[in-house]
Image (tube, grey):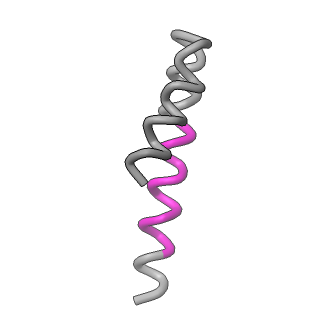
Amino acid sequence: MESIFYLTLRGLTITTVALNFIIAKVLPEGLTAQLLILLKMV
């Protein structure tokens, strides 16, 4: 049970970092906005 939760959380973290990296590459100013949106969702 813990391992599944851990893997899911880790997967979401990696996905979030990847999305933020892509957004930062395309639109530097979008990084902060994306982080705020993600924080509101969590």
Q: Is residue 7 left or right of residue 25?
A: left
Q: Nearer the viewer, residue 29 or 17?
A: 29
Q: Is residue 32 above or below residue 29?
A: below
Indicate the quadrant where residue 40 lies.
Answer: top left
Residue shown at 50%/74% (left/top)?
Answer: 6
| Chief SS of the magenta region | helix
Indicate the quadrant where residue 29 lies.
Answer: top right
- Residue 26: percent from the left, percent from the top? 52, 10
> Which stretch did the figure color magenta?
6-18
Residue shown at 57%/40% (left/top)?
Answer: 17
Residue at the front extreme?
Answer: 40
Residue shown at 43%/76% (left/top)?
Answer: 5
Q: Is residue 8 above or below residue 18?
A: below
Q: Is residue 15 magenta?
A: yes
Quarter occupied by the N terminus: bottom left
Quarter occupied by the C terminus: bottom left
Residue shown at 49%/46% (left/top)?
Answer: 39
Residue at the bottom extreme?
Answer: 1
Q: Is residue 23 left or right of residue 1?
A: right
Question: In the rendered picture of this protein, how many numbered marks are placed on residues?
Answer: 0
Q: Nearer the viewer, residue 16 or 3?
A: 16
